[in-house]
Image (spheres, coloured by chain):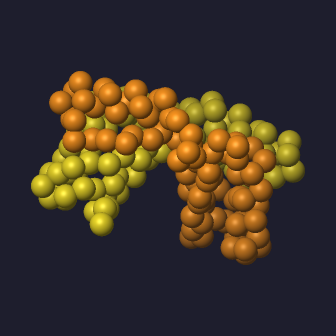
Chain colours: A orange, B yellow
């Protein structure tokens, strides 16, 4: 079975996000001062071949831990969906 | 009312994603050859103060168009949620 995964990797809340801070400032300069607390991370989409959803989940988790996220500074979450 | 927005900005399907290609290759080297078609974009979370959801949606759309996404190379989508 084939699954598609949508993964979000975000900087941990305790950690400063200078890119997000800069964008929050730019929003103000552009007349969008209503926008606050911008945080910027990565969005990753991928496809995975696995026998079942549990196996797919395990593999995606491994990929996140080993390659996609730096767990010292980032957290991740993902959703899995079977591809018809 | 305060809303939180979760925005995904992804490279257009028609456009090569060299970062995603590199990560797809790394997956193979790491023994995760089941993972294919990796595409990497940005995930942005922000908070917005607006009178109602329609106004919040309009402002977030404006922010995406003007600052967060490069519409020549990227597409965006977002979800809005009221913050209790």
On the question of residue B77 being in view, the answer is no
Horizontally, residue B25 falls left or right of residue A38, namely: right
Of B75 and B6, nearer the camera is: B6
Quadrant for the N terminus of chain B in the image:
bottom left
Q: Is residue B11 above or below residue B3?
A: above
Q: Residue B72 appears at what percent x and percent y?
A: 37, 29
Q: Residue furthest left?
A: B51
Q: Residue B10 appears at what percent x and percent y?
A: 47, 41
Q: Residue A23 appears at what percent x and percent y?
A: 37, 30
> In percent of the image, x 76 and y 61: which residue is there?
A59
> In percent of the image, x 79 and y 39: which residue is there?
B26
> In percent of the image, x 41 and y 31: which residue is there?
A21
Q: Residue A70 appears at what percent x and percent y?
A: 70, 42
Q: Quadrant of residue B65?
A: top left
Q: Is residue A6 above or below residue A3?
A: above
Of A20 and B42, nearer the camera is: A20
Horizontally, residue A34 falls left or right of residue A84, namely: left
């Amino acid at each position: 079975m084939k699954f598609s995964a949508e993964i979000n990797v975000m900087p941990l809340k305790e950690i400063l996000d200078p890119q997000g801070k800069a964008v929050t400032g730019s929003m103000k300069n552009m007349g969008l001062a209503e926008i606050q607390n911008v945080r910027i991370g990565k969005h990753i989409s991928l496809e995975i071949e696995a026998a079942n959803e549990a196996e797919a989940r395990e593999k995606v988790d491994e990929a996140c831990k080993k390659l996609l996220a730096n767990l010292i500074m980032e957290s991740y979450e993902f959703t899995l969906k079977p591809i018809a």
